[in-house]
Amino acid sequence: MNHKNANMQIVITGLGMVTSIGLDVKTSCASARAGLERKSELELEIVDEQALEMESLTGNKISLITDGFDGVGRLVQLGVVAIEDLLKYSDLEQNELSNTGMAILLRDNYYQNAYLQRDIVEDIDDDHFRKEIYTDFEREYKEQFRVAERSLIKNIESYSNIFLKSKLKKCFFGGTADFMSVIDFACTKLRHNEVQRFIIGGIDSLIEGHTLEALNSLGLLHTVENEYGFIPGEAAAFVMLERHDAAVKRDALIEGVLVAQEKEMELYHRFSRKTVTGEALSQTIERCLRHSNIGRPASSVALGIGNINGDPFYAKEYGNTLVRMKGVGLPVDFVTWSTASSFGEIGVAAGPSAICVGIRAFAGGYARGENILIWLLSENASRGACVISKFKGANG
């Protein structure tokens, strides 16, 4: 790699995280490596038809931090803790944030829209009344998105006592795999020298009131009656990206390199009742490996981090993806780990959380290779993958 290309590398210089098993990235990742999980009872109760009694749903809740908060307020609480952790981890001073952008992925209204269609308007025969319900629903969520976009980053800055002078502060809305669009946005701005560094992340909570009710009604949660559902969770995770030359100039600790990221749209989503093929996910993974110059066989990729969560839809698609990828040449000892195994289903926070786990694996020496493949499924049609590599240059 020539000097110019090396300078254009996008490197990872900071991590921040809060999960149900750790209030910072080091504790969260160490606990995940140890196989820890922390479930607690949630406020929503359901009927156990076998025992004929009420039973509380369980989830991976972040106690104390989110208690008493819902909606944007809950996301702000999570975001503040994770951002403060990132600043501490990266050892950045306030004056170094003057040329820093921020992009955060938030969950769209996919679950609520599916709940509306299947449980509320499905049996309504009056087309006009049905249209009114949809119109009111769209108006309500558009307003929620506007509030989040207008206030989320501003409140995170305020409560974290930081101030990003850059005008590049943006909220994205989508599914888990849409985090690749956030990465692409940040990398483009960095390579065009519009900012010196970029904080990217995702915040989500699947255990708050309306979301939890929708998930339960749709039959997606793990319960006594539904052993194939997922355990809901909540988390926030952030990653600091910088151009290699800028990171070296400020003597930053570089722990990884973002080598490639890809996103593809499937022809189906969870509730479309179409055949699950795994085609889009396999294409994104193959393109990532090819653009990473890893080649075939991809023997240097011994660890994959994804977001399968105990749900049949995700499991079937990932299984079909592996079948399609036989020609890629992943090593025989290739193993995968899922963010849901320790954190629960954390929605759009899964992408940045996977990067945090991967970088900490490099730092701790247990990554099993020089490259880590990260792949993401979504409830909607988006599928994504990226490759991060261990930084081989000198630090300090």
Image: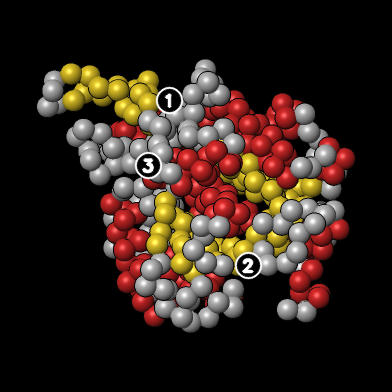
Nearer mark to the viewer, of 3 and 2: 2
Say few, some or many: other residues with alpha carbon within 10 Å of mark 3 (under 14 / 14 to 19 / 20 or more): some
The disc labelled 3 sits on which kind of residue? Ala
Please state which of residues 318 and 175 is positioned toward the viewer in this rendering.
318
The disc labelled 1 sits on which kind of residue? Gly
The residue at which mark 3 appears reads as 114
Nearer mark to the viewer, of 1 and 3: 1
Measured along the vertical axis of the image, is residue 134 above or below residue 100?
above
Say few, some or many: other residues with alpha carbon within 10 Å of mark 2 (under 14 / 14 to 19 / 20 or more): some
Which residue is rendered at x = 76% and y = 68% of the image? 8
The residue at which mark 1 appears reads as 209
Mark 1–mark 3 Cα distance, whole angstroms, equals 16 Å
Image x and y of residue 303, in percent: 46, 62
* Residue 262 appears in view: no
Which residue is rendered at x = 14% and y = 26% of the image? 49
Image x and y of residue 94, in percent: 83, 37
Mark 3–mark 2 Cα distance, whole angstroms, equals 36 Å
- For label 2, the SS is strand
* Residue 218 figure quarter: top left
Image x and y of residue 10, in percent: 71, 62
The residue at which mark 2 appears reads as 259
Find the residue positioned furthest to the front: 365
Which sits earlier in the primary sequence, circle 1 or circle 3? 3
Mark 2–mark 1 Cα distance, whole angstroms, equals 39 Å
